[in-house]
Image (cartoon, rainbow, N blue to C red):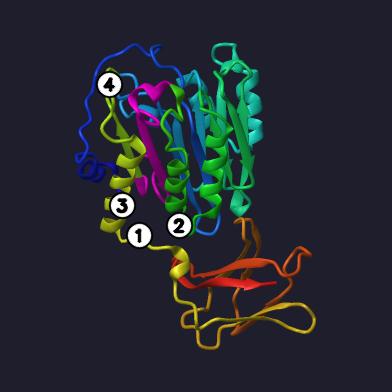
Amino acid sequence: MKRKTIGYFRASIMIFMVSMSSQSFSQDTFSIVAIDSVTGEIGSAGASCVGSSSSYPHGAQILSDVIPGIGAIHTQASWSAVNQQHAHDWMMLGLSPQQIIDSLVAHDAGSNPAIRQYGIVDYFGGHPRSAAFTGTSCTNYKNDTAHLNYSIQGNILMGQQILDSMQSRFLNTPGPLSDRLMAALQGAKVIGADTRCAIHGTSSQSSFIRVGKMTDPPDSLYLDLWMAYPSNLSGIYPVDPIDSLQTLYNIWKTSTGVKDHSSVKNNTVRVYCDKEGFVVFDLAYCRDYKDATLFVYDISGKLLTTQMIISRVTRFAIPGRNTHEMLVYRIVRQDQTIVGQGKFIR
């Protein structure tokens, strides 16, 4: 969905634009970047007690850089446009998330990396990588957690429980990546999650969610929604920005007909293990499987193996020794049509 069409959804919440200096609000708080290596989607979501202004027209969304098919970068806490551009350029050059962070620390635009915070993930051909950094001089409470295919980070927080709740919601919510990102934000919807916003009776002043498909142009993401109160708005806010974003997301999801990718019908594919321990895929009743590719992932989304399908029965060994492990498979034609998809136990 192109950004110009998103205006319909943004219009359902009034956004005011006011002026302020770029130094007035230099922090951004809780956020998540994540990869779904099964679909190739790359996502970014977050919220902060930073409002809409001439410097931050979409509030907290300024920290987000989603590069479809490649990765996502969050540069937050004393946000710097120079640092964010450097991170983008280094990712485009093929540096890993940890290498990007190491370079940002070594070449900080203000020679003060201790006040910055970063969360970075990349797709890396279906083998997601992540890294995070929290400077020692970021405002408390501050912390991060980076795992295989996601990174969650925050500063000026109520406490560790905000990050823990985001992580739990992300990992335990079923459905597509966008659902899990929204669930992660809902996990942080606590009055004063960003402590500066306790006075407003909300978790934050602005929020956003962005998801890019493999083939999306960077400036026209599949999903790109935000909500921000004006930076100079005082008093109690009528609706928490995360709830407002949830409303926009629900409208978007209904309008675009988004479905969980696991709902693809796959009863024509038979999967079993033979006596030698090989996994066998029998596509006897599966149409259009020729010239397709079989992808097998672990439950965290790490790509384990790929196999070109050249016959009705495909038999091969899967790397790793874990038994009774849930795995995910996906059979995709060259035109990206999903022929079959499902789960099985190794």
Q: Residue at x 78, y 84 (%)?
A: 275
Could you give the CA–CA distance between mark 4 and mark 1, rounded to whole angstroms? 37 Å
CB-based contact (under 8 Å), mark 2 and mark 1:
yes
Which amino acid lies under the numbered mark 4 shown in the image of this protein?
Answer: Gly
The local crowd at label 4, few if under 14, some if 14 to 19, many if 20 or more residues have their Cα within 10 Å, is few
Q: Nearer the viewer, mark 4 or mark 3?
A: 4
User: Residue 322 location in percent, x, y?
Assistant: 76, 65
Indicate whether 83 appears above or below 272: above
CB-based contact (under 8 Å), mark 4 and mark 2:
no
Indicate whether 254 appears above or below 166: below
Residue with the mark numbered 4: 235
Q: Nearer the viewer, mark 4 or mark 1?
A: 4
Q: Which mark is residue 250?
A: 3
User: Residue 171 location in percent, x, y?
Assistant: 56, 51
Q: Which mark is residue 258?
A: 1
Quarter assignment of residue 242: top left
